[in-house]
Amino acid sequence: MEPDKSRNFLWLALKVGGGVLLLLLLLFGGLITYVTLEKRRYDRLTDTHDLKQRAVSMGEGYVAERRNAALVIGITQRSKRAVLGFGRVSATNAVPPDAQTLFEIGSVTKVFTAIALARLDLDAKMRVADTLRASLPEKVVLPPALEPVTLLQLATHTAGLPRLPGNLDLSPGNLANPYAKYRAEDLHQYLATAKPNNPPGKLRDYSNVGFALLGHVLSVKTGQPYEELVREAVLLPWGMTNTTLRPNEAQRRQLTPGHSPKGDEVPSWDFEVFAPAGGFRSCAGDLLQFIEANLSDAEGLPSRALVESRRARRVGEAGEFPLGWQSEVLLQDGMTIFWHNGGTGGYACFIGLNRERQIGVIVLANYGDAMAGRFDVDKVGMDLLKLGSRIALE
């Protein structure tokens, strides 16, 4: 899971849209100036039919700064696709990565977990309004402050839970694979004495443990393994055959090695009860299938679950939020985008879409940039989303 913040507009603009310029303007009280400049810059865009070439320039720039980097950019725009691979699959394989190359996708997994919840709600097997106390066995001890927390609050980061549980081993020796040994019994032990940061529904506060708990609840309540719930709600309907928690031998050969921000190869991350917060591996081909399903107006239960996950819902005083997704109304044209990023020790990922302009972007990299506070992958993805709403692929 990435150390990304649950970003408000200013953070997103600082990391993605304006960098040093925005920081300077803010220091001098110039937010209005920045907004005006950004809107004017966007309004001046004409369709130069070169979005693909712009993506090539961004991708080449990314890998040029990183030894043995692998980067894949996928764009879907009004029924046309482009998949662009940069760098090399590994230190011993100079072939560029492609649509089937696997990457860890970290917290993009949370979107799948939320869609599994939406599907169970549509099937009347569970309800987003269900509380933790009603959803977990009585033997699982909950402090009074957590008993009324709802699945909706978990799926929107408004439950008040911290980012990580207090009993997660973050010692230096465990950081190479921090979630591998954290099991359901550890989560239950944490819950027994957990102290929320905020009252449920009060504020939005990004929580990895909240999504681990959500996926655990879905599995306990239905009696189905978490991965099976995601397979039924997301993977099977959209033909995502290379998206998995536990790669088989053939898939392991497709996984590009991860790298630390300094360029050293690092081991993959493994997950037990934390899998719903960040455990999936995937590839550009599968993720483009998923993005295109979200851009479509198809009927049927699987598509309805996607619609329900994107629907903004009022959550107490915190505001209105979709399930799992991050969403932003961009300055340009008031467009709404849905996005999420992900990061593990050796990988970074971004997915995003704009239904109004029928554009979707995915970016996959085998460098754990977020561990060093770098969000270059996010910037590439967000820039391409904005450009792609005005500029055609070719």
Image (cartoon, rainbow, N blue to C red):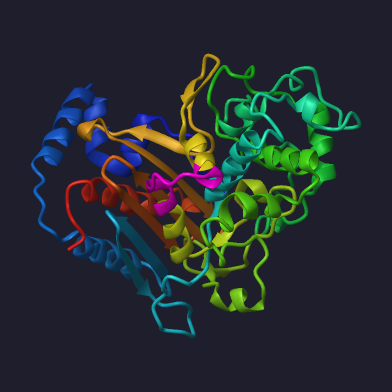
Classify residue 72 as left or right of residue 234.
left
* Between 51 and 32, the one nearer to me in the picture: 51
- Is residue 2 shown to the viewer in this render? no
Q: Residue at x 50, y 50 (%)?
A: 342
Magenta range:
292-303
Q: How far across and down, in percent of the image, does residue 228 sit? A: 70, 54
Furthest residue in direction top, as rendered: 317
Q: How far across and down, in percent of the image, does residue 113 sit? A: 61, 44
- Would residue 297 be counted in the magenta stretch? yes
Q: Residue at x 67, y 58 (%)?
A: 177
* Between 384 and 18, the one nearer to me in the picture: 384
Classify residue 341 as left or right of residue 216.
left
Q: How many marks?
A: 0
Above or below: residue 10 compared with residue 261: above
For residue 161, which quarter of the picture? top right
Q: How far across and down, in percent of the image, does residue 8 sit? A: 40, 30
The quadrant the C terminus occupies is bottom left
Classify residue 201 as left or right of residue 51.
right
Q: How far across and down, in percent of the image, does residue 61 sit? A: 28, 65
- Would residue 281 be counted in the magenta stretch? no
Above or below: residue 169 compared with residue 255: above
- Is residue 272 shown to the viewer in this render? yes
* Between 331 and 306, the one nearer to me in the picture: 306
Above or below: residue 305 compared with residue 388: above
